[in-house]
Each structure stands twice: as structure tokens, then as C-alpha cells.
């Protein structure tokens, strides 16, 4: 999957969840830049770090002309823009990476379930499968961790997916892992014990979870394979 940036800069500060200041011309002049990711991303977006950018131009009603795409963690680029998650998830479904059929039925994106919209609903001859997608950029000691900030919305999605399972549907969570050096995945009990406990409960009840590892070399997003899910509570 090609993802070619339009520029490169030095991250200066994060003003709020969705606004960063980036030195684009190398002279210390801060340019307002959109951060399309609600996570903390502290290991990716910090003062002095290299970032890759996409130029979107002067769009009416928009205050910034640039988007952050990725930040450098060690010697690897880490995707830091959740707007690309759909594109990556579409690729996963089109290529049949998941161990259940996604081509034999109707694939409906942004399907309503309860009070939420779930990323995909596969409605096929074998029944219905709900698929919710989450992006992960944080890793410690080789373990990818999600979330990097408390997410009541994520816990709500799990609850609604469990309700759907009680009515006979299948459900799974697809974790797109962009964290570097990750060889395993765990819910982040330290940062969000509520979400992590809900996920553990859901898996015991039959929900599936697929942590899929991706790398980004600054030009292309590459699929590296599925990594094991563990429960690292300490």
C-alpha cells in the first residue's frame, strides 16, 4: 500500500488533540498541522522529532494545510494518522487475511449497531460478522499496547459487539499494529483497565481479536503478519 508523503518536518508541540505545530522549512517557523488521531502518541509526536507530512492545501473551513502522517520512533516510521486505517483495513479484507470469508457476503462499512457505528458488517450465507478496527502505535519491550489513552468509546464498542453475539452474530476486533519492534500484543491494563477487562471478558465469550503487524518505510505500508495476543497485566 503506497503512502508517499509531501514533506518532512520537525515536531514542535501539540497544542490540543488535533492540532500540532511543525517546523516545515527548517528555520524554526511553526506551521499549524492537523493531527488526525485522538491517541496520546507521546512516543511519536514529541518536541524535536522528525515527522512526515501530507499537504492538503487551502480547504474552505479548514484551519490547517498540512496533516501529520507519521513520526520517527528509533529508526522506523510509525503511522500516526487514523484516517489511513480504513484503507489498510480494506486491504486486509480484500486480501482475505482474516480466517473467515469476507468476500462471499455483503460487506457494509459503517454499519449501525445499537448506538454506535461499527467499521464493517459482513452479511453472508454463514451469518453476520461485525468487525471493529483499532490502530495501535505504542509498544514497550516488544509488546504492542492498546489503547495509549483511556477510551470509553472503545469499551462501548466491545459491549455492543457482545450484545450482537448474544443475538447469534459473530464479532471480532482487528488491531492494526504500527508499533515498531512489536512481536506480541496486549490490551493496555495499566492505561485503561476498564477497556482491557472488557476485551478479556469478550474474548472469553467467543469474540475474536486479530493483532496484525504493519511497517511503514516512509513510502509504503507493508504487512508483516499476525502477532500473538497476550494479557500483560503488570
Image: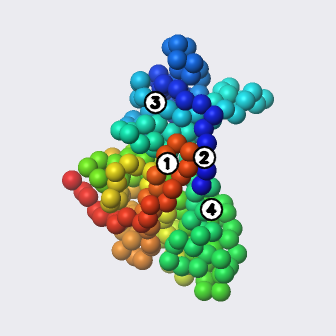
Q: Position of residue 97 (x, y in %)?
A: 53, 71
Question: Against 163, is 75 above or below?
Answer: above
Q: Is residue 155 left or right of residue 127?
A: left
Whole-Å distance between the Cαs marked 4 and 3? 28 Å
| Residue at far left of view | 234
In the rendered structure, which disc, 2 or 1, sits on the residue that comes first in sequence? Answer: 2
Q: Is residue 180 left or right of residue 2?
A: left
Proximity of marks 4 and 2: CB atoms separated by less than 8 Å? no
Q: Residue at x 34, y 51 (%)?
A: 181
Whole-Å distance between the Cαs marked 2 and 1? 9 Å
Helix, strand or loop status at disc 3: strand
* Location of residue 185 by image quarter: bottom left
* Location of residue 59 by image quarter: top right
Q: Residue at x 42, y 28 (%)?
A: 49
Give the residue at mark 2.
3
Give the residue at mark 3.
50
Give the residue at mark 4.
90
Whole-Å distance between the Cαs marked 2 and 3? 17 Å
Q: Residue at x 58, y 60 (%)?
A: 89
Which residue is at the front of the view, 36 or 165? 36
Look at the image and tell me whether residue 186 can be seen. Answer: no
Helix, strand or loop status at disc 4: helix
Helix, strand or loop status at disc 2: loop
In the rendered structure, which disc, 4 or 3, sits on the residue that comes first in sequence? Answer: 3
Proximity of marks 2 and 3: CB atoms separated by less than 8 Å? no
Whole-Å distance between the Cαs marked 4 and 2? 15 Å
Question: Against 203, is 83 above or below?
Answer: above
Foreground mark, 4 or 3?
A: 3
Tell me the crowding category of disc 4: few under 14, some 14 to 19, or many 20 or more residues within 10 angstroms, Cα based.
few
Q: Is residue 142 left or right of residue 212?
A: left
Q: Which mark is residue 216?
A: 1
Amino acid at each position: 500500500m503506497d503512502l508517499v508523503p509531501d514533506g518532512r518536518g520537525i515536531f514542535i508541540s501539540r497544542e490540543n488533540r488535533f492540532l500540532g505545530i511543525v517546523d516545515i522549512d527548517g528555520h524554526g517557523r511553526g506551521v499549524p498541522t492537523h493531527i488526525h488521531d485522538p491517541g496520546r502518541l507521546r512516543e511519536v509526536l514529541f518536541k524535536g522529532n522528525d515527522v512526515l507530512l501530507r499537504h492538503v492545501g487551502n480547504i474552505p473551513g479548514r484551519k490547517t494545510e498540512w496533516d501529520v502522517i507519521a513520526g520517527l520512533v528509533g529508526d522506523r516510521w510509525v503511522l500516526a494518522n487514523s484516517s489511513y486505517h480504513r484503507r489498510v483495513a480494506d486491504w486486509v479484507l480484500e486480501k482475505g487475511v482474516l480466517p473467515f470469508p469476507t468476500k462471499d457476503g455483503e460487506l457494509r462499512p459503517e454499519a449501525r449497531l445499537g448506538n454506535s457505528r461499527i467499521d464493517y458488517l459482513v452479511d453472508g450465507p454463514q451469518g453476520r460478522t461485525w468487525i471493529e478496527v483499532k490502530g495501535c502505535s505504542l509498544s514497550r519491550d516488544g509488546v504492542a499496547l492498546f489503547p495509549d489513552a483511556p477510551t470509553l468509546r472503545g469499551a462501548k464498542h466491545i459491549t455492543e459487539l457482545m450484545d450482537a453475539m448474544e443475538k447469534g452474530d459473530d464479532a471480532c476486533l482487528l488491531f492494526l499494529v504500527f508499533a515498531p519492534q512489536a512481536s506480541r500484543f496486549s490490551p493496555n491494563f495499566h492505561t485503561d483497565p476498564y477497556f482491557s477487562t472488557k476485551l478479556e471478558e469478550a474474548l472469553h465469550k467467543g469474540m475474536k481479536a486479530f493483532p496484525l503487524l504493519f511497517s511503514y518505510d516512509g513510502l509504503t505500508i507493508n504487512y508483516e503478519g499476525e502477532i500473538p495476543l497476550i494479557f500483560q497485566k503488570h
